[in-house]
């Protein structure tokens, strides 16, 4: 994948260095956790990097999901610095007694003029760009902001940097956003970015788990949780 490191060659007798190195007997895991619901999520508004707080249901979702994730005994908690992600992570931090690190690379796609708009408004005002966005174009500047390629690269870096600091068989929970998390998953498993839409959406406060394998990262769980709500709009 252009612009992303080739992390699939490890495990075949080739000596590698860097954050994605996997030694025999080491199987680190990473959970990508989407934040709880906000009022803009409920209204179907494209949030991007607009700093919208959790609503009452979102805070309840965070508490319920945190109780399940705490059972995994995470070693590291990292969150997007947007408030909705920080507040979601705080619910887990309280249960497991860990500090939360903030990493702006885990933010949602910066969507420029689209932020605050509904999908109907985007489709009406930017029909060609909307069609390209729905089609998964990785080089489209979403609302004049970031490309999905750029988001995938920063998500890949954030996840692999966190994983590199885990103990053997350790687990990190990284709280991010729906669109960014899917792009991170695609980058980690080596999926071409124009096909990333084949990875289903993440519901609010649901998560995906990846595990290091001999040939790179493996998606072992996706959109997990208890009866997750339907995904309405994800980039947020």
Image (cartoon, grey):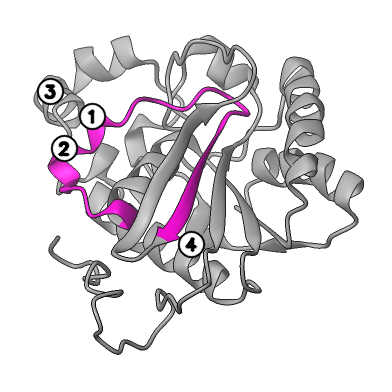
Which residue lies at the image location 23% right of the left edge and 38% below the top edge? 196
Q: Marks 4 and 1, how far apart in space?
A: 21 Å
Q: Left or right of 157: which side holds 5?
A: left
Which residue lies at the image location 30% right of the left edge and 52% below the top edge? 189
> What residue range appears in magenta?
188-212
Q: Secondary structure at mark 2?
A: helix
Q: Which residue is mark 3?
A: 131
Q: Marks 1 and 3, how far apart in space?
A: 16 Å
Q: Position of residue 221 (x, y in %)?
A: 48, 36
Q: Position of residue 8 (x, y in %)?
A: 24, 67
Task: Give residue 89's mark.
Answer: none
Q: Which residue is mark 2?
A: 195
Q: Which residue is mark 4?
A: 159
Marks 2 and 4 in Cβ contact (< 8 Å)? no
Q: Nearer the viewer, residue 61 or 216?
A: 216
Q: Earlier in the sequence, mark 4 or mark 1?
A: 4
């Amino acid at each position: 994948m252009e612009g992303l490191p080739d992390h699939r060659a490890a495990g075949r007798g080739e000596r590698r260095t860097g954050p994605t190195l996997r030694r025999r007997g080491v199987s680190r895991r990473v959970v990508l956790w989407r934040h709880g619901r906000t009022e803009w999520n409920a209204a179907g508004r494209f949030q991007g990097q607009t700093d919208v707080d959790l609503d009452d249901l979102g805070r309840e979702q965070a508490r319920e999901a945190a109780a399940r994730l705490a059972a995994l005994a995470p070693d590291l908690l990292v969150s997007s610095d947007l408030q909705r992600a920080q507040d979601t992570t705080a619910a887990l931090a309280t249960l497991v007694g860990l500090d939360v690190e903030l990493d702006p690379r885990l933010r949602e796609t910066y969507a420029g003029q689209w932020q605050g708009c509904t999908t109907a408004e985007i489709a009406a005002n930017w029909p060609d760009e909307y069609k390209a966005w729905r089609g998964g174009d990785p080089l489209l500047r979403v609302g004049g902001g970031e490309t999905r390629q750029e988001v995938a690269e920063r998500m890949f870096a954030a996840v692999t940097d966190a994983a590199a600091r885990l103990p053997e068989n350790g687990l990190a929970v990284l709280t991010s956003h729906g669109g960014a998390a899917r792009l991170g998953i695609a980058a980690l498993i080596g999926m071409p970015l124009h096909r990333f839409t084949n990875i289903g959406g993440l519901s609010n406060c649901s998560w995906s788990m990846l595990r290091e394998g001999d040939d790179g990262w493996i998606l072992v769980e996706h959109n997990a949780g208890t009866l997750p709500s339907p995904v309405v709009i994800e980039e947020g």
